[in-house]
Amino acid sequence: MAVDQLYQWLPIPKTAPGPSPVWVEEERRQRCLLVKYSDADNDLAMEKKRKIEVKLREFDDYFKRTYADLDRYPVPDYLVDDYGKGNINMAVTGASGVGKSSFINAIRRVKASDSSAAKTGVVETTMAPARFDFPTEQGFFSRMSEKVKSILNPSDDPIQPGDVLLLNGRQVRVQQKSTTGRRLTVEEIESGQTREVESSQVTGKLSDCMIWDLPGTGTPAFPQATYIRSMGIRHFDLVVLLTATRFTEAEMMLMQELKRWRVPFFLVRTKIDSDVQAEIELREECQQEECEADECLEIEDDTVAVIKNYFASLYDENVYCISSKPSYRNKYDFLTLEADMEEKIKKQRLFLRSELSESYSSSWWNPFR
């Protein structure tokens, strides 16, 4: 019989500067164990004490390194209020006119006429980071709209019927709680199956998600050399880099920095529908007659393939060809991009609690190597 696995939703991304909250918690736990074995009078306990002392010295070195890294790459002022609470922060960047606002509205399923929409229809350079929340229960992260119950700092149980939780990495919705609150009846969102679990087996509520419209890199106001630090890029769960043509040299250097710091990023080619339509019109002009439906589909496939191959040859990275228009979201790569972004964020935030043990071992990441 499979054992339910307990996952923790980390309050910050795994790749963020500074010490991991997991290791802060583990260091505290090791110090408690040291007290437990401080009066050891048998060989087994003394050996455990010796190993703990070794680990604590390693932790001291680890914290010195990671806090120094955090000093070099601090959380920027604009992000402080929304950071370290379990909230998801995604960055969207690109040059003026590439369709950032349309993309931000599309991924939030917000109409351009909505009061919370990012302004579109004008060419405007972003001069300061702008935050946008996910106000609807549709589309991307629709199931991640609740606050995280932090296992690092547990408080009164906030779980209520209707909450979306994680169990074995799967999202479940609470249907009922027992009178003691210790047992929950949950429904798996994907399969619709209902089951009973112990409340201790779930991480808690999933977090809010914010998307940030950032100024583009490589401008006099935001030079590439200081962009990572000034924008706090390393503190984001992921970065979406948009272009409507090709990426600039500064953006290509940003890609290399993102790789260096292991920050997940996505290259997105916007306005693909306009490229397809232009190719269809060119074909019709050449042959002086309208293209048939099959011919249009062939042109569409060829156009997308050419653009993908072009980007692959230049950047050696996968590129997502999308249109942010509502009628085109089911075409091209928009839905694939959403799914891949969600998976990356899960990898950034999910930690399997059983990976920690008294003897201190972790298959997730060893901070001392």
Image (cartoon, rainbow, N blue to C red):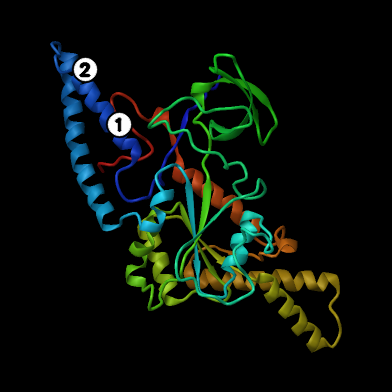
- Of 70 and 122, nearer the camera is 122
How far from the left and from the top, in percent, is residue 213? Answer: 50, 63
Q: Which mark is residue 18?
A: none
Point out residue 166 in the picture as x, y percentages from the top left corner.
54, 33
User: Mark 1 and mark 2 in contact (Cβ < 8 Å)?
Assistant: no
Q: Does residue 157 sit above or below 241 in this rendering?
A: above
> With 201 as the anchor, is 280 left or right in this view?
right
- Can you see residue 3? no
Q: Earlier in the sequence, mark 2 or mark 1?
A: 1
Which image quarter holds the C terminus? top left
Label 1 crowd (10 A; few <14 / some 14-19 / many >=20): some
Q: Quadrant of the N terminus?
A: top right
Q: Amino acid at mark 2?
A: Lys
Residue at 35 percent of width and 29 percent of height: 356
Give SS at disc 1: helix
Give the number of callouts: 2
- How far apart are the two marked residues, 2 and 1, measured between alpha carbons? 15 Å
Question: Badge 2: few (under 14), some or many (20 or more) residues near its Cα, within 10 Å?
Answer: few
Query: Which residue is rendered at x = 26% and y = 57% of the image?
Result: 72
- Amino acid type at mark 1: Glu
Q: Looking at this view, name the residue that lies furthest to the front.
A: 115
The residue pinned by badge 2 equals 36
In the picture, measured across the screen, residue 246 lies left or right of residue 306, that is left
Q: Is residue 58 visible?
A: yes
**Which one is nearer the viewer's eye here, 202 or 114?**
114
Q: At which x and y percent is residue 243?
A: 55, 71
Give percent across and percent down for residue 266: 51, 60
Q: Residue at x 83, y 70 (%)?
A: 294
Quarter of the image for residue 297 reads bottom right
Nearest to the observer: residue 224 or residue 299:
224
Q: Is residue 251 left or right of residue 59?
A: right
Report which residue position mark 1 lands on: 26
